Amino acid sequence: MASRQQARTRYNDSVLRSVEAVGGPISDLVREAFTATDRAAFINGYYAPSGGKYQWFEFSNSNPSQDGLERIYSNAPLTTQFDPVTRRPTSSSSMPGLMVSMLQALGAQPGETVVEIGTGTGYNAALLSAIVGARGRVYSFESSPDIAEAARSNLGRAGCRNVVVINADDITASRPAVADRMIVTAGFPCIPASWWDGIVDGGVVVVPLRQGPGHPLVRLTKNAAAARWDGTYVSYADFMPAVGPGISELHTALRVVRVDGPGNLKSSPTDLSKARDLFDVKFFASLECDQVENAVVVAADGAKLATGFGLSTDENESTALAVPGAIVSTGPEGDGLRDRLLGIIEEWQRLGRPRVADFTVRIPRDNGIDADTEDVSGWRTRVGKVSLTVRPRSRP
């Protein structure tokens, strides 16, 4: 049985190696902050599957269980709050590798002021605290009063004196300072107009920006002379949607398609066997078509036959899903949906199989969320010489 220190050391090493394997070298600032900050200090419990449903498990830092240490010191998100009505997760400790990637993209420096949207457990704010140092400041916004108070306690025990947790909605709250950088840990459908005046010219925002069924990470730089945000996509990801009175984000449910059994599915082979390829195609498909969604095909006995992304119809439960190595389809319109999805994949291949990180984005200053009407505008995304107009889904 590994000791707590051994488990933590393995966790630090494995997370950092996994990030470097995909994204390249990690700065000394981010590396040192990550290895010096104990994730367990910010977790007092988590939800995990048990008996076919999610159950709450207490975690004691003074007397931790082996199972608790294994879950906390793993490169996996931990759900820390559920909405009792919708039964959807509403707060979590994000996947550590993704946090490191976001911090690397943010590029915060000692002495800077950073705004964080979505405090959660306070773990990410503690990492930022270590990066900006005693001369820097971190202002972290959290819409839930209970979560904000718990994070304050966690950060206080960890000695993070340069972090201020603000229980307020990030759009409607007045900012205590203009930030050098901003990091967002919840998915947004577009860039709120209030962010423009909250950050210096040349300042950086790292945000999960809604595109289709996911929230790919975008690194934006404020370009005051051109009155726009200039940015690049970092990676494909998915985040819990932002909540609060100043924003109305769409919650994307997993579509469930029911069939009698495996005999109802047709399978067409593709060369998309790697998870990374599927993420890249999903992102590209969501640019080409605003109807792309995540879905699962379930047999009459409850068995899951396929889980992937693709196109579906509401009228007769037809669907075509991209899964590793194939497109599976079912229903009266399944063949047509399959052909449409194959056409998108062929276009992606024709363009040289672009990765998510190959795309750039420009967002005009006024092309965001109106705080009064919460209307969402579109923006333009480009890859190489190809230009595509991207529009989030309309609110129901």
Image: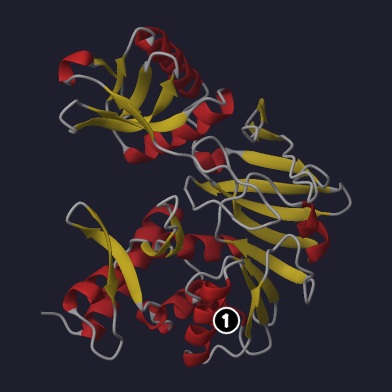
Question: In the image, is residue 304 above or below residue 23?
Answer: above
The N terminus appears in which quarter of the rendering?
A: bottom left
Q: Position of residue 255 (x, y in %)?
A: 39, 32
Q: Position of residue 330 (x, y in %)?
A: 30, 15
User: For the residue carrying disc 1, how many other residues have a C-alpha within 10 Å: few (<14), some (14-19), or many (20+)?
Assistant: many
- Outermost residue, front direction? 85
Amino acid type, mark 1: Ser
Q: Which residue has dot 1 on it?
A: 129
Q: Residue at x 35, y 7 (%)?
A: 332
Q: Position of residue 111 (x, y in %)?
A: 69, 82
The C terminus appears in which quarter of the rendering?
A: top right
Question: In the image, is residue 298 above or below residue 38?
Answer: above
Note whether residue 25 is visible.
no
- The answer to whether residue 40 is left or right of residue 5 is right
Question: Foreground: 349 or 147?
Answer: 147
- The answer to whether residue 78 is left or right of residue 32 is left
- The answer to whether residue 44 is left or right of residue 234 is left
> For the image shown, how many numbered marks are present on the structure?
1
Note whether residue 5 is visible.
yes
Q: Residue at x 20, y 51 (%)?
A: 52
Question: In the image, is residue 273 above or below residue 364?
Answer: above
Residue 320: quadrant of the picture: top left
Residue 327: quadrant of the picture: top left
- Outermost residue, left direction? 1
Q: Position of residue 252 (x, y in %)?
A: 49, 40
Question: In the image, is residue 258 above or below residue 30?
Answer: above
Secondary structure under tag 1 reads: helix
